[in-house]
Image: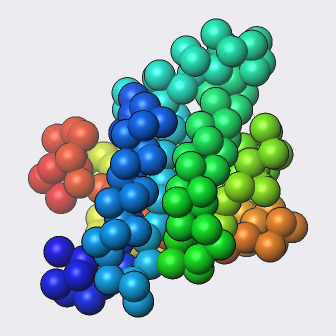
Amino acid sequence: MANTLGKNIWINIPHLATNDYITNLAQLFLNTLEPHLTVYVEYSNEVWGTQFPGGQYAQAQGILSNYSTDPTQARFCFLGQRTNDISTIWKNVFGTSSRLQIVVNTQAVNADTTNRILSCRGTQAYVNAVAIAPYISISLNDSMSFTNIFTGLNSQITTLATTIQTHLVYTNKYGLSLYCYESGQGLTGGDSAKTAL
């Protein structure tokens, strides 16, 4: 699809992928992706949290590996270490090609996750970029007017812009890029008020 459309591609490595799988995947992209296209490689999906299986797995593995007695820091450090492993494997296949971009995910609303993940296990030396998903949302209730809603969303945009600046401080410290892989309003689903809106 990337070749057909002439577009760069972003892939997520499954959280249970073996090193052999990762090596074969890197070789597949080296051999089949058009040479003018870039591949962005990220370990799993939103491993900074525990909403998805990758984060739950990372937390358990980080604790087992004695990366930290704090579950959150153990998860961050495992995310960093596995990203480092993936980076090493892909760079062994691709060499120093700029066609390869290794990305680590962090939490958009909490810039400290970027600082903690990059500084654990030397992750900042293995990646090209940090990726966040800066959504905006507010708590809704039946008595809110559209004016209330948009005033609240505007306030969220202002707050998030400040947080993104802090992410940039941490990424700039190591000469890394900051990417947005998803974004928008987060008012859909979850409860009846949001659904009705």
Instruction: Give the residue at the far left of this rendering.
Output: 196
Instruction: Locate residue 46, reporting x and y percent.
Output: 47, 44
Instruction: Locate residue 150, reporting x and y percent.
Output: 39, 72
Residue at x 15%, y 50% (from the top left corner): 195
Which corner quadrant of the image does residue 145 belong to?
bottom left
Instruction: Locate residue 60, reporting x and y percent.
Output: 55, 15
Residue at x 64%, y 20% (from the top left corner): 62
Instruction: Give the residue at the far right of this rendering.
Output: 173
- The colour scheme applied to this rendered structure is rainbow
Q: Can residue 148 be seen in this view?
A: no
Instruction: Locate residue 50, reporting x and y percent.
Output: 47, 28
Q: Is residue 89 left or right of residue 39?
A: right
Q: Is residue 187 visible?
A: yes
Q: Which of 15 and 140 is in front in this view?
A: 15
How many numbered marks have been drawn onto this rendered protein structure? 0
Above/below status of 74 relative to 25: above
Image quadrant in which the N terminus is located: bottom left
Residue at x 36%, y 52% (from the top left corner): 25
Above/below status of 148 relative to 125: below
Above/below status of 171 relative to 68: below
Q: Which of 57 and 133 is in front in this view?
A: 57
Q: Which of 26 and 60 is in front in this view?
A: 26
